[in-house]
Structure formats: structure tokens, C-alpha cells
Image: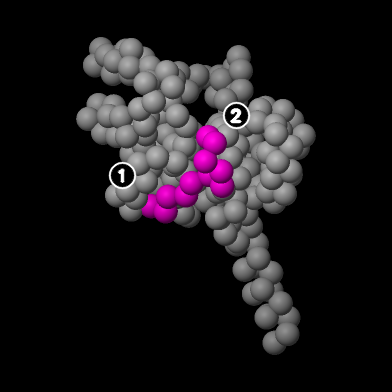
Amino acid sequence: MTESLYVGAELSIMDTQTKVTGVILAGGLAKRMNNQDKGLIRFKGQPMVSYAIAAMRTVADQTIINANRNIPEYQAFGLPVISDQTDSFDGPLAGVLTAMMFAETGILLVMPCDSPLVNADHLQKLLATRAKNDADVAVAFDGKRLHPVFLAIKATLQPSLQDYLQSGQRKIDLWLEQHKMVIADFSNASDIFTNINTMTELSDLEAQGEG
């Protein structure tokens, strides 16, 4: 009886460690888009954040949105909405830290709100790459450069991230390099990381889909 209880407890702990919280980063100021809220801008008739929500749906046990503006509009998608701990728009790492504080799972799966070409298969690859290597974090790589806002990351890095931000540092690459990091290679699908920073880029990407 004791043995079966122990096994059950062990499985419960492992289940928590391997469950995934999806995190959609929508907390930036989007200065190049006249401070519009990028997640709510429409791409092919749908708010951009809706594409990220759809991509997360089958790979995350729970999905949350990190947003610092237009909270009621994001809440309308039916997901928890969390804001940074500060009101100074400290960048994506601030959103990741807030998500780590909120999440009850061992793994976070992170993506931005403005990459509508990324789908569930791409996110699953991030998760699988981290798990296969038992790494602290897996980061997307397009064959030329890293895309450090696409992450599968252990929640246990929270103290490290908190210290890093409290020291005044903000650069995501420098913090990631402090940990056991592996690369998820997307060089055969590099176009999926096309994000939208200006209204011209939005129009261009929509036009490509029509061609």
C-alpha cells in the first residue's frame, strides 16, 4: 500500500513538471506601429493574437496572455490575462517572469502575439527539442539567427530571471546564455518567424497569402 501511494505521488509530481503553460507575449508598446496594440490588429480578418491562441490550443495544458494594455479586450478571448510586475514596459523577459510566477506547470511555452504563421507543429518541435536534451530552455533558430521570444523553458529558472531583471538588465539573449540552452532548428521553415512591426509589413504579409 505504501509503495503504491509513493508511486502515485511520484507520478503526480512528474505530471506537474511536464505539463505546459502556453504564454503569449502581447505586452509591448509597438512603437513602430504608432503604439497600436499588435495583438489586436487584424490579419486576414482576425486579431493577430487569435493565431497564437490557435497554435497553443493543442500543445499547451493552459494558455495565458501577457498584456499591459487593453486588458478587457484580451480577456474577451476567454484566457487568463496577466500584466508585468512593473508598469515600465521592460520587455519580453518581464512578461516571461510574470508568467513563471503565475504558472503551476514545470514548462512554459512562449511565443509573441505577432507571428501568425507559427502553428502547433512548430511549437511542439520546441517542446520536443527541450525535452530530448533535458535542457533548461530551447530557443528557435531560423538557420541564420535566434528568435529568443520563441521558447520552451523550465519554470525553475524564475529566481535567476528575477535576479537578472532586478539587476537592471533586459537583453534576453544574454540571460538565456547563462543556462543550458539548446537550439530548435527551423532553417527549413524560416519564413514562419515573419513578424509584423509596421503597417506596411502587415499589408505585405497579407498580400503574400493572397498570391
Quarter the N terminus occupies: bottom right
Left or right, residue 132 beside residue 178: left
Q: Let me know if residue 129 appears in the view.
A: no
Residue linked to disc 2: 148
Residue 96 at x, y percent in the picture: 58, 42
Foreground disc of the pair 1, 2: 1
- Residue 48 versus residue 166: which sits nearer the camera? 166
Q: Main secondary structure of the magenta part?
A: loop
Q: Which residues are magenta?
A: 79-89
Residue linked to disc 1: 73
The residue at the point 44 percent across, 42 percent down is: 67
Q: Amino acid at mark 2?
A: Pro
Counting residues from the N terminus, which is met first, the one under dot 1 or under dot 2?
1
Residue 123 at x, y percent in the picture: 50, 37
> According to the image, what is the colour scheme of the structure?
one colour
Helix, strand or loop under label 1: helix
- Identify whether 148 is placed above or below 81: above
Q: Let me know if residue 49 appears in the view.
A: yes
The residue at the point 52 percent across, 41 percent down is: 87
Q: CA distance from mark 1 to mark 2?
A: 27 Å
Helix, strand or loop under label 2: strand
Residue 20 at x, y percent in the picture: 54, 51
| Cβ atoms at labels 1 and 2 below 8 Å apart | no
Residue 24 at x, y percent in the picture: 46, 40
Residue count near mark 1 (Cα–Cα under 10 Å), binned few <14, some 14–19, many ≥20:
few
Residue 106 part of the magenta segment:
no
Left or right, residue 160 beside residue 46: right
